[in-house]
Amino acid sequence: MNYWLMKSEPSAFSVDDLKTLPDRTEHWDGVRNYQARNMMRDQMKVGDRAFFYHSNCRVPGIVGLMEIVREGYPDHTAFDPAGRYFDEKSNPDQPRWFMVDVKYIRHTRRVIPLAELKAHAALENMPLVRKGNRLSIMPVSETEWNVILSIENGADR
């Protein structure tokens, strides 16, 4: 099993939005970065787990847990000329962008703020806490996953 962190602005799509959808499942669309696309297309597998991270908000941080329930497939939002994520160079025969389906597992017991994650030495190599990393999707090691769950549970307070 692999672990991931997936960012979304809560004003665009929040963990609460995911929770209220039928089957608590939705496609994760609109990713327009090649490195993130490659992770979704080539590395994310059914059963992988992901942290849901709210970005570009008052308190950015981890707010929930999700499961990957469908592996990478063409992002249909790239084909819609009227859509926000349209890419004229992408088409169904040669898709440029991909997405996965995610399923809500649960909210974290509390928001785990970025500032708190940065304060933990065990997470110093995590892409999220390094300067200049702006990817919306990033891998999380099993050790980092477990450290973050222990932070959520207050094990190191």
Image (cartoon, grey):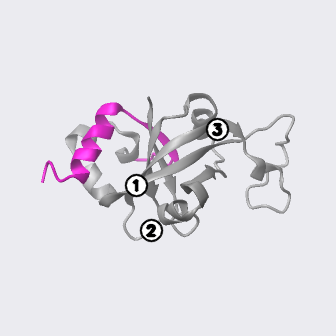
The residue that mark 1 highlights is: 106
From the viewer's perspective, tell me whether residue 25 is left or right of residue 97: left
Query: Gap in Å between the C-alphas at discs 3 and 2?
Result: 24 Å
| 28 relative to 3, above or below | below
Query: Gap in Å between the C-alphas at discs 3 and 1?
Result: 29 Å
The amino acid type found where label 1 is placed reads: Arg
Residue range in magenta is 131-157
The foreground one among 97 and 151 is: 151
Q: Secondary structure at mark 2?
A: loop
The residue that mark 3 highlights is: 34
- The percent coordinates of residue 78 (x first, y second) are 78, 50
Q: Earlier in the sequence, mark 3 or mark 1?
A: 3
Instruction: Give the numbered dot on residue 23.
Output: none
Instruction: Tell me if residue 102 is in the magenta stretch.
Output: no
- The percent coordinates of residue 92 (x first, y second) are 85, 40
Q: Is residue 124 visible?
A: no
Query: Gap in Å between the C-alphas at discs 2 and 1?
Result: 20 Å
| 35 relative to 52, above or below | above
The foreground one among 136 and 62 is: 62
Q: Label 2: few (<14), some or many (≥20) within 10 Å?
A: few
Q: Residue at x 44, y 31 (%)?
A: 2
The residue that mark 2 highlights is: 57
From the viewer's perspective, tell me whether residue 77 is left or right of residue 114: right
Q: Quadrant of residue 33?
A: top right
